[in-house]
């Protein structure tokens, strides 16, 4: 196995970077609204399928297709909040969970209607591979790591230096204090859904050239991102990144033994880790 | 500036504030004093839209603000420093103050002059702009809460029990700051359990008991009132 360690680790970091983005997208919404959005994986799927459809079927240039895909995910996320969640303001957390599960089912059905049930893929942005140990990782996959890192950096800058970002953080910390400062918690929540969906959409666009994407693939991506978020500790963005990377790396190492069980075993390991540290790996 | 007319408010079916009327004129400091549970905080929270008003009306200038959401009332020029301060603990002092700018739109130069004014009033904050609000002492947190409210350049400032939990030396410092704000012409409604200090700094005052206003007079007159002396000043 030793000669493949580097390869598994590199692949794990690649996939983990995408899970980390999805975990962050969960966290953006949860921090501002207190809602755990179980439709988050569908935003991954919508971002990916919109991009793939526009580029492959409609022959739109790749950069424009990516922008349109991420924008569509953001708009769908915003619409989900405005139509599905905002009217239920003040409901119990269980009610919100049921609403987001319903949204997930609806979005999946709509996606199968619009794009069909066949998988879509996107061309790799960079051709060729890099030799790591006894194996090779393609250059496109490695490109995912800095792109995900850049998205995270942009997210940090957004929350630290923009007015909307500061307002969203204020809502996350103290909603009453935020209202007293003239901030509309509804608007901040809407912004968090749009941003969270856009982030998930970026994750979808990045993973499609590697794994392909179809109407029902978002749920598993969402579960992996969610696992990363709870492993790192909901509400802790750094924890979400570490948690997402850990899920990716664990999953890839399990592939060595059986790729068929990678999803199940990865989640079992997450559960075991959470039994040891119920509030996340970075909890004190 | 602020006029409350026969207002009743509370939580669900529990009516805490009962048919209260009061007014605060421009450039005036008005104290609202009373014991624990008298209804001071509920009154302030209902004026600012944090809880619903069941009866009566609230006017800010000539605008009826009854039932408007807190964020809209804040943007109309009424700022509350609530009991407990409601700061953003993981955000820095500078970030807390920047968020305070939301309620009162300001150009870049106006914003800079507001930062300068806040740092002049609270120089300790300027020394630690990068510190997290949650890492500050109770006194510094109270100053930050006041500073954050001042960043919106409100027409009227409502202070809810600002001296709660502070050491006596910090209470004295806090009331010095309130006196300075008064000198600059700021309009303030101050709810306090520290009756002595509140009436010292106030032009006028109201005494609230069991959700009703039972006395109203100038600060010195209330201090010398037998009822206030017996109930609140231990005379």
Image (cartoon, helix red, strand yellow):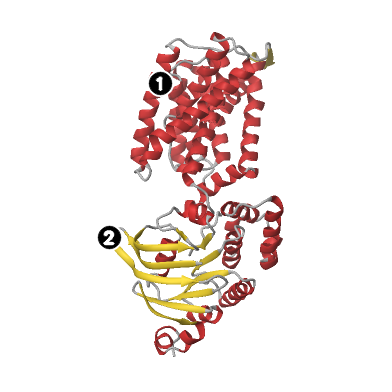
Q: Position of residue B191 (x, y in %)?
A: 47, 71
Q: Chain of mark 2?
A: B
Q: Chain of mark 1?
A: A
**Point 42% across, 11% down: residue:** A117
| Residue closer to the observer: B154 or A258 | B154
> Mark 1 and mark 2: span between their CA atoms?
44 Å
Q: Position of residue B77 (x, y in %)?
A: 54, 59
**Point 51% across, 86% down: residue:** B220
Occupied quadrant, residue B66:
bottom left
Q: Residues within 10 Å of mark 1 (few under 14, many from 20)?
A: many
Occupied quadrant, residue A154:
top right
Vertical relation: A236 (above or below) A55: below
Element type where label 2 sits in the image: loop
Q: Position of residue B113 (x, y in %)?
A: 70, 59
Vertical relation: A80 (above or below) A179: above
Query: In this figure, which residue is indicated by the disc labeled 2?
Result: B13
Q: Position of residue B16 (x, y in %)?
A: 33, 67
Give the numbered dot on residue A108.
1
């Amino acid at each position: 196995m030793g000669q493949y360690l580097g390869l598994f680790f590199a692949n794990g970091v690649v996939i983990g970077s995408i899970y980390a983005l999805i975990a962050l997208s969960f966290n953006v919404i949860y921090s501002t609204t207190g809602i755990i959005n179980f439709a988050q994986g569908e935003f991954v799927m919508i971002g990916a399928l919109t991009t793939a459809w526009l580029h492959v079927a409609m022959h739109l240039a790749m950069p424009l297709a990516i922008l349109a895909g991420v924008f569509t995910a953001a708009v769908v996320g915003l619409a989900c909040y405005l139509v599905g969640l905002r009217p239920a303001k003040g409901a119990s957390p269980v009610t919100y969970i049921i609403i987001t599960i319903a949204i997930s089912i609806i979005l999946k059905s709509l996606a199968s209607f619009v794009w069909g049930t066949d998988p879509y893929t996107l061309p790799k942005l960079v051709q060729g591979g890099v030799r790591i140990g006894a194996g090779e990782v393609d250059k496109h996959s490695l490109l995912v790591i800095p792109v995900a890192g850049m998205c995270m950096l942009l997210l940090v800058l957004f929350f630290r230096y923009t007015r909307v970002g500061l307002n969203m953080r204020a809502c996350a910390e103290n909603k009453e204090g935020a209202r007293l400062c003239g901030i509309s918690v509804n608007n901040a929540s809407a912004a968090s859904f749009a941003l969270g969906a856009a982030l998930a959409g970026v994750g979808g666009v990045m993973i499609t050239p590697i794994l392909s994407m179809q109407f029902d693939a978002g749920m598993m991506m969402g579960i992996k991102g969610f696992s990363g978020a709870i492993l790192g500790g909901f509400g802790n963005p750094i924890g979400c990144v570490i948690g997402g990377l850990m899920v990716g790396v664990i999953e890839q190492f399990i592939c060595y033994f059986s790729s068929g069980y990678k999803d199940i075993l990865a989640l079992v390991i997450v559960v075991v880790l959470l039994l040891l540290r119920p509030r996340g790996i970075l909890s004190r | 500036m602020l006029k409350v007319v026969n207002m009743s408010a509370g939580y669900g079916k529990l009516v805490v504030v009962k048919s209260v009327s009061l007014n605060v004129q421009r450039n005036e400091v008005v104290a609202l004093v009373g014991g624990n549970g008298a209804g001071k905080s509920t009154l302030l929270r209902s004026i600012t839209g944090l809880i619903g008003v069941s009866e009566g009306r609230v006017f800010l200038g000539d605008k009826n603000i009854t039932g408007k959401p807190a964020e809209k009332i804040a943007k109309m020029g009424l700022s509350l420093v609530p009991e407990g301060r409601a700061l953003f603990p993981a955000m820095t002092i500078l970030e807390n103050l920047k968020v305070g700018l939301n309620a009162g739109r300001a150009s870049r130069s106006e914003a800079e002059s507001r930062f300068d004014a806040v740092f002049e009033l609270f120089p300790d904050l300027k020394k630690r702009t990068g510190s997290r609000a949650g890492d500050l002492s109770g006194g510094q947190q109270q100053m930050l809460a006041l500073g954050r409210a001042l960043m919106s350049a409100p027409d009227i400032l409502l202070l809810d029990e600002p001296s709660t939990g502070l050491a006596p030396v910090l209470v004295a410092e806090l009331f010095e700051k309130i006196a300075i704000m008064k000198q600059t012409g700021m309009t303030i409604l101050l709810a306090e359990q520290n009756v002595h200090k509140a009436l010292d700094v106030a032009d006028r005052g109201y005494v609230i008991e069991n959700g009703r206003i039972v006395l109203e007079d100038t600060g010195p007159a209330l201090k010398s009132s037998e009822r206030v002396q017996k109930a609140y000043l231990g005379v």
